[in-house]
Each structure stands twice: as C-alpha cells, then as structure tokens.
Amino acid sequence: MGQFFFENGHLFILGQPMGNVDFRKIMDIKGILLANLSMGRLEVENNQLVGSFIVGYIQNATKS
C-alpha cells in the first residue's frame, strides 16, 4: 500500500475529501461508468487496487 501512495499523483487522487463521481446517480439513470485502467497508466498492482476501490464504491452506492 505504501508504494502505491508514493507514486506520482495517487495520494492526491485518493486523498480528496469529496469525490466527483456520484455512483448512485449513475445507477439511478442507468448510466455506464467507464474507467480507463490500462496497463500504460498504472502498474498491475495499482490497477487492481484502484479497481477494488471502484467496486467498493459501487457496492456502497447499491446500499444507499
């Protein structure tokens, strides 16, 4: 986890007090969320971590 936060910009992205993506609204309007986690932008471990955060946010949105 420490390696992830020390890479450029990752701490800034995840450390924001309020996210800009409203997962509940996307689900309510039956929208589609596209997340570019291509290998060129992040390493494999970082892709998996960011992907798990996104899945967690979607799961929380289903409960609200």
Image (cartoon, rainbow, N blue to C red):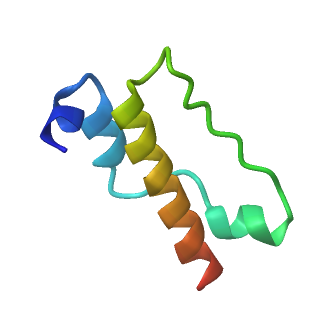
Q: Nearer the viewer, residue 63 or 45?
A: 45
Q: Quadrant of residue 26?
A: bottom right
Image point 43% across, 42% down: which residue? Answer: 48
Extreme residue in the top direction: 40
Quadrant for the N terminus in the image: top left
Q: Is residue 53 left or right of residue 62?
A: left
Image point 33% across, 49% down: which residue? Answer: 16
Q: Nearer the viewer, residue 6 or 20?
A: 6
Q: Is residue 6 left or right of residue 41?
A: left
**Image position, residue 25 (x, y; %):** 72, 67
23 up-or-down from 49: above or below:
below
18 up-or-down from 43: above or below:
below
Quadrant for the C terminus in the image: bottom right
64 up-or-down from 18: above or below:
below
**Image position, residue 30 (x, y; %):** 86, 64
Extreme residue in the bottom direction: 63
Extreme residue in the right direction: 30
Q: Is residue 26 left or right of residue 54?
A: right
Image point 67% across, 70% down: which residue? Answer: 24
Q: Nearer the viewer, residue 24 or 48?
A: 48
**Image position, residue 63 (x, y; %):** 59, 85
**Image position, residue 41 (x, y; %):** 47, 19
